[in-house]
Structure formats: structure tokens, C-alpha cells
Image (spheres, rainbow, N blue to C red):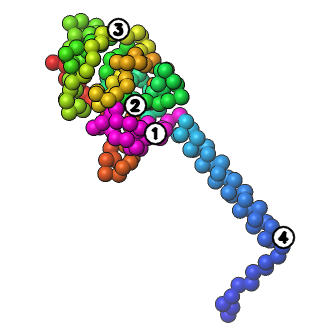
Amino acid sequence: MRFWTRVENTEAGRQKQAIDFVFELIQVAAISLAIIIPVRYFLIQPFYVKGASMEPNFFDHEYLIIDELSYRFRNPERGDIVVFRYPNDPRQFFIKRVIGMPGETVEIQNGQIKIFNDENPNGFVLPEQDYLDQAFTATTRNITLKSDEYFVLGDNRIASLDSRYFGPVKRNQIVGRVWLRGWPLDRWKVFEQPSYSLQ
């Protein structure tokens, strides 16, 4: 009875093994790219927070995953936390919260935000207690949005460069909505759209 197996280690055998290995490597790389590239460029995209404009909900250097797919089927909604290209320099990306929707009039006065639209011609005060520690918005503004414009604000109203200063954001400048905070791990969270009670 044999307890060993004979292996022929010829030059031709080694070359075939090397070619098979390289071919398998190319296949794995091609399949990986076929999966990763569409996901990276059409579905989700990583970003990290830079600055304090969204504190206390987002802090400097937190790592976020942005959902780019949803807005291919629906428009942003009030309360969504979005990443968009800065209107004054499209090379920069900003993160803010959607406050005013297309066609609405946004009035900021006495620290409150009032929204006027077809459903609320007399306006309603935007309830922000779910995501703001102190729901006070400085400055006075009154702006009517066009059909493709959104009014966005940072959650840290005293330290945010937002629509109060650079104006509305156009629909085609919005990259996607914040879907997941992946880092730091102790602040890991999936973000849903806030529900507003407009009583």
C-alpha cells in the first residue's frame, strides 16, 4: 500500500499553474470592479464631516455613507440631511438639512422658521425640537424658492454657512442623502427622515 503520491514538477506544469493563477486573478479583479464601481458611483458614496456646522448631530471627521440611489426615484424631503455641491464652488461638498421645499416661502424671524406653501397659506412654524437642542435661528430672511430650489440649514445655526448666506441649493446640485454614520463605531447610526407634526 502506498502512502505517498508522486508529483511531477516539470517546467511546463509550473508555467501552466502560473498562467491559471494570473487568469483567476484577472477574473476576480474584473468581477470585483463590476460590483464595486456601480455601487461606488451610482448607489452609495463615502464622505467625512469637516467642520462644526452640523453639531451636535454630526461632528468633525465622522465618516458617513451617502445614499445616491433614492433621489433617482424621488425628490429630497423636508428634514433630509443631504450632501450637495457648494453653489459658489462646485468642487466642495457641504452637508446640511433640507428646510424649505421647491415653491415654498421660507421666513426666518425672531429666531423661528416659518414655512408658507399651498397647504399652509398662513404659514406654520417649523418644529425642530427633534434634532436641535436650541431651536433658535439667527438672522432675518424671507425667500421664495423656485421649482428646482431647496433651502438648507446647518443644525449648528450659530456656526453654519448655509442658505441664509449663499442662497438656495438647486436640485441638480444635491448628491444624495446621509444614510449611515459608520465611524466612530460608538456613534454608528442609520438615518431616517424626520416626521413633522404640523399642528
Q: CA distance from mark 1 to mark 3?
A: 31 Å
Label 1 close to label 2 by CB (< 8 Å):
yes
Q: Earlier in the sequence, mark 1 or mark 2?
A: 1
Place of residue 88 in the rendered image (x, y in percent of width and height, measured from the top left): 49, 21
Place of residue 107 in the rendered image (x, y in percent of width and height, measured from the top left): 27, 12
Closer to the eye: label 3 or 4: 3
Q: Which residue ends up furthest to the bottom in the rendered image? A: 1
> Residue 164, relative to residue 94: is it above or below?
above
Q: CA distance from mark 4 to mark 2?
A: 59 Å
The residue beneath circle 2 is 95
Q: Nearer the viewer, residue 114 or 78?
A: 114
Q: Earlier in the sequence, mark 4 or mark 2?
A: 4
Q: Earlier in the sequence, mark 1 or mark 4?
A: 4
The residue beneath circle 4 is 12
The residue beneath circle 3 is 144
Residue at left offset 50%, top offset 36% = 43
Assign a secondary structure to mark 2.
Answer: strand
Numbered mark located on residue 47 in the image: 1
Horizontal side, residue 79 vs residue 44: left or right? left
Mark 3 Cα-neighbour bin, 10 Å: few <14, some 14–19, many ≥20: many
Horizontal side, residue 112 vs residue 48: left or right? left
Place of residue 124 in the rendered image (x, y in percent of width and height, measured from the top left): 20, 14
Label 1 close to label 4 by CB (< 8 Å):
no
Q: Is 197 covered by the magenta stretch?
A: no
Residue 131 falls in image quadrant: top left
Assign a secondary structure to mark 4.
Answer: helix
Q: Earlier in the sequence, mark 1 or mark 3?
A: 1
Q: Amino acid at mark 4?
A: Ala
Residue 130 appears anywhere in the view = no
Q: Earlier in the sequence, mark 3 or mark 4?
A: 4
